[in-house]
Image (spheres, helix red, strand yellow):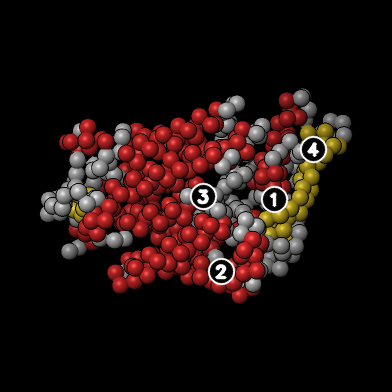
């Protein structure tokens, strides 16, 4: 059987159906959990504004308690996806609303927010509602027991990209020698019984190296039948540990839900959908070559290129952050810093220092330790003075430390950031570069 024949070979659609149910529930849990944990309140209700992605500054939270209704609506849509009710409409609306949340704020950026958006887009293209769904019950004509093999392979490839680049990004001195793990575990004060263990250097090295080995091997081990059970056990331990220690929301369970695509479809059917008839996989399905060629092929090419783009940008991405997002560079650095924003009236020469006291703690951290945060804060200051009829220059004076490496200047204090433009694709010259010893490069 050729690769093309395998690609379009009909298989039981149980893995995709079961994943849809898991996925919909996780969409619900993410949305409602954000309300119950106070995340919506702290990020959108109590703040005067958010740092949206550059170019989308108009995308701001709804006034008053509007964001509570926003997230509650997403929770309801998640249940619709889970039940397969108006599946594509519900998932389309959820994707739009979640994209709004993702692009609306950067103060609390998390890789699983990005992954959630990507999987929403993939699932929109897959026939996940054709069995065990309200849609199939209301319209029996859409009911199917099979799907093309490529539907499973698309999900596997997405996770393979995530894990591969998560491994590559860990090949840094601070990860390999346990420095970052020490900093990371030092902030887990909700587990007092583990403080002694978390303070041991050997444990830092164990977590660092086992995490890197897990990311590198988990997909190959799942793909090989003989090691699949071992990979399953390791995944349970790895993700539950992360869930308890790091408290990173739904991501551990989200990652575990992809396991259904690695087991034989008949196995998934027998475990989760016992009443589902055995599928006739001898009946050919529409190949949907156009969907693969014009949607999925460009999509996966982009997914492979985006994490590589920082190699084409001058400077160390760990320091400059240029090329950091959309690259699966997960939990690699701790940034601390301080900055003052000097405002100079271009006409009178009067100098003032802008107070950041109105910003939340997360916003202050973002606006003083990240190059794009500093730039966006400078432009907010400029716009605030422009509204008062004043023409000002804005300078950022401060230092940043990455993984406690020592404090150094991140941006050129002599650059008027009010005039500086943000370069989306290449290095911004006002961001100072440092070599491996954190000495400024001129």
Closest to the observer: 122 or 292?
A: 122
Hey, which quadrant is residue 188 in on the image?
bottom right
Q: Residues within 10 Å of mark 1 (few under 14, many from 20)?
A: many
Tell me the distance, in whole angstroms, between the alpha carbons under discs 1 and 4.
16 Å
Tell me the distance, in whole angstroms, between the alpha carbons under discs 1 and 3.
24 Å
User: Residue 153's spot in the image, x, y percent?
Assistant: 31, 56
Residue beneath label 4, please?
354
User: The N terminus lies in which quarter of the figure?
Assistant: bottom left
Residue beneath label 1, please?
369
First in sequence, mark 4 or 3: give its number. Answer: 3
Closest to the observer: 274 or 165?
A: 274
Hey, which quadrant is residue 376 in on the image?
top right
Tell me the distance, in whole angstroms, between the alpha carbons under discs 1 and 2.
25 Å
First in sequence, mark 3 or 2: give its number. Answer: 2
Tell me the distance, in whole angstroms, between the alpha carbons under discs 3 and 2.
21 Å
Residue beneath label 2, please?
208
User: Residue 323's spot in the image, x, y percent?
Assistant: 56, 53
Closest to the observer: 88 or 250?
A: 250
Residue beneath label 3, please?
249
Closest to the observer: 314 or 179?
A: 179
Residue plotted at (59% across, 72% down): 203
């Amino acid at each position: 059987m050729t690769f093309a024949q395998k690609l379009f070979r009909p298989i039981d659609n149980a893995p995709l159906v079961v994943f849809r149910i898991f996925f919909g529930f996780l969409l619900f849990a993410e949305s409602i959990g954000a309300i119950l944990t106070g995340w919506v309140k702290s990020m959108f209700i109590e703040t005067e504004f958010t740092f949206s992605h550059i170019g989308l500054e108009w995308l701001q939270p709804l006034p008053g308690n509007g964001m509570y209704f926003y997230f509650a609506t997403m929770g309801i849509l998640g249940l619709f996806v889970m039940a397969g009710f108006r599946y594509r409409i519900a998932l389309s609306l959820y994707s739009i609303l979640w994209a709004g949340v993702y692009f609306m704020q950067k103060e609390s950026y998390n890789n699983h927010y990005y992954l959630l958006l990507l999987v929403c887009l993939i699932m929109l293209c897959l026939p996940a509602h054709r069995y065990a769904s309200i849609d199939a019950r209301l319209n029996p004509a859409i009911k199917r027991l099979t799907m093309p093999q490529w539907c499973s392979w698309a999900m596997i490839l997405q996770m393979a990209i995530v894990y591969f680049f998560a491994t590559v990004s860990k090949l840094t001195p601070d990860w390999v020698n346990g420095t970052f793990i020490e900093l990371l575990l030092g902030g887990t004060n909700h587990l007092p019984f583990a403080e002694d263990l978390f303070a041991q250097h050997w444990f830092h090295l164990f977590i660092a190296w086992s995490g890197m080995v897990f990311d590198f091997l988990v997909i190959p081990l799942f793909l090989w039948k003989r090691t699949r059970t071992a990979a399953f056990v390791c995944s349970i331990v790895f993700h539950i540990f992360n869930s308890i220690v790091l408290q990173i929301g739904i991501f551990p369970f989200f990652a575990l839900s992809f396991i259904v695509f690695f087991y034989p479809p008949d196995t998934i059917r027998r475990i989760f959908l016992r009443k589902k008839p055995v599928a006739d996989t001898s009946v050919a399905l529409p190949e949907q070559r156009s969907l693969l060629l014009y949607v999925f092929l460009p999509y996966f090419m982009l997914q492979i290129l985006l994490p590589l783009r920082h190699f084409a940008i001058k400077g160390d991405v760990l320091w400059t952050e240029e090329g950091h997002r959309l690259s699966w560079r997960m939990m690699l650095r701790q940034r601390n810093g301080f900055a003052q924003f000097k405002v100079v009236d271009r006409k009178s020469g009067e100098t003032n220092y802008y107070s950041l006291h109105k910003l939340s703690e997360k916003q202050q951290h973002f606006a003083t330790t990240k190059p794009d945060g500093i730039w966006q804060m400078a432009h907010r200051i400029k716009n605030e003075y422009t509204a008062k009829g004043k023409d000002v220059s804005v300078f950022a004076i401060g230092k940043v430390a990455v993984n406690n490496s020592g404090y150094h200047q991140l941006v050129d204090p002599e650059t008027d950031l009010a005039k500086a433009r943000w370069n989306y694709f290449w290095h911004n010259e006002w961001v100072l570069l440092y070599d491996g010893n954190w000495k400024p490069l001129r």
